Image (spheres, rainbow, N blue to C red):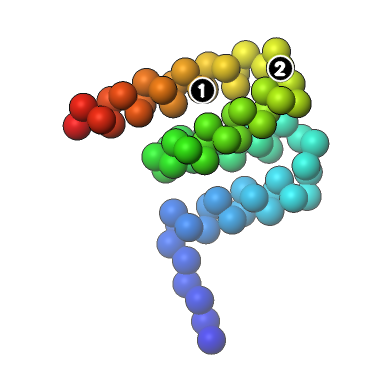
Amino acid sequence: EIYTLSLHDALPIYELHKVEKNPRDIEVFRQLGELYIKMGEFNDAEEVYKFILKTSPRNSDAKRKLEKIKLLRRLKKRN
């Protein structure tokens, strides 16, 4: 049986595979979080950035991304 995935479904699987191969690489998690933001998957993105902050509490990029997610959620509610 052949399965086909949309790009929307395939990209997170690819990124999660990279996370499994490099579980200590913050950059891989950052890329996954950015992908989730672009897809509008704000809950998943938020989890990723909170994880980054647990392992790297001073990570300013993760802090900024969490603020961006809050803003994007507010904008989404307005529409």
Q: Quadrant of residue 52?
A: top right
Quadrant in which the C terminus is drawn: top left
SS type, badge 1:
helix
Q: Is residue 17 left or right of residue 67?
A: right
Q: How many marks?
A: 2
Tag 2: amino acid: Pro
* Image coords of residue 43 (percent x, y): 47, 38
* Image coords of residue 67 (percent x, y): 47, 18
Q: Is residue 56 above or below residue 39?
A: above
SS type, badge 2:
loop
Q: Quadrant of residue 76?
A: top left
Q: Is residue 28 left or right of residue 7?
A: right
Identify the residue at the far bottom of this view. 1
Q: Quadrant of residue 72?
A: top left
Which residue in the structure is indicated by mark 1?
A: 66
Q: Which mark is residue 24?
A: none
Q: CA distance from mark 1 to mark 2?
A: 13 Å
Q: Is residue 45 left or right of residue 69?
A: right
The residue that appears at 64% across and 50% down in the rendered structure is 16
Which residue in the structure is indicated by mark 2?
A: 57
Report whether residue 35 is seen: no
Mark 1 touching mark 2, by CB under 8 A?
Answer: no
* Image coords of residue 42 (percent x, y): 44, 36
Q: Is residue 62 above or below residue 31?
A: above
Identify the residue at the far left of this view. 79
Q: Is residue 17 left or right of residue 8?
A: right
Mark 2 surroundings within 10 Å by alpha-carbon count, few (fewer than 14), some (14 through 19), many (20 or more): few
The residue that appears at 35% across and 28% down in the rendered structure is 73
